Image (cartoon, rainbow, N blue to C red):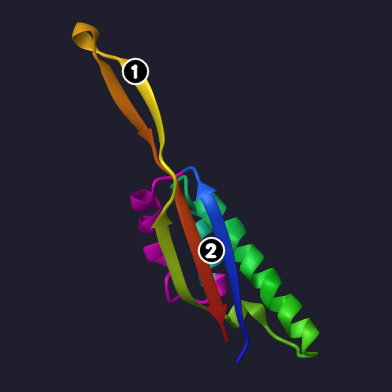
Amino acid sequence: MLEARAKLSNSRVSARKARLVADMIRGKRVIEARDILEFTLKRSAEPMLKLLDSAVANAEWRAREVRRRVDTDEFIIKTIMVDEGRTFYRYRPMARGRAGRIRHRSSHVTLTITE
């Protein structure tokens, strides 16, 4: 059973927003997931589409190493995990001379596809 993995680190999208897109493609076939990601209007859809293409390329490379032919469109997204990444802190002037904290959140996405 062929399995391939790809990881996206420090994507400048919060983990909460990226999980919405990850939930849409979890458990789907690769060709269905690619269609969903192409027509989703969320900002995290484009990096996840590139991540999916990377996982497919990794699967094709693995198959070539063991001299097997595979149809990567029929692969299934086994797991997709979105974890919190680093948070960048910035400060903005607020009323009464105070400073308000602004948090720029990021996320790590791990994708595994299998036959």
Q: Position of residue 78 (x, y in %)?
A: 47, 78
Using the image, determine if residue 113 lies above or below residue 18: below
Q: Which mark is residue 10?
A: none
Q: Amino acid at mark 2?
A: Asp
Give the residue number, with chain letter if any, for mark 1: 92
Q: Quadrant of residue 67?
A: bottom right
Give the residue number, with chain letter if any, for mark 2: 35
Secondary structure beneath label 1: strand
Q: Is residue 41 visible?
A: no
Q: Quadrant of residue 64?
A: bottom right
Q: Is residue 97 left or right of residue 29?
A: left
Kindly report the secondary structure that dominates the magenta region of the rendered protein.
helix
- Which residue is rendered at x = 35% and y = 56% of the image? 20
Q: Position of residue 44 (x, y in %)?
A: 47, 49
Give, as a single range, the part of the protein colored magenta.
Answer: 13-31
**Image quarter of the C terminus:** bottom right
Q: Is residue 68 left or right of residue 23?
A: right
Decide: few, some or many residues near mark 2? Use Cα within 10 Å; few <14, some 14-19, many ≥20: few
Q: Quadrant of residue 22?
A: bottom left
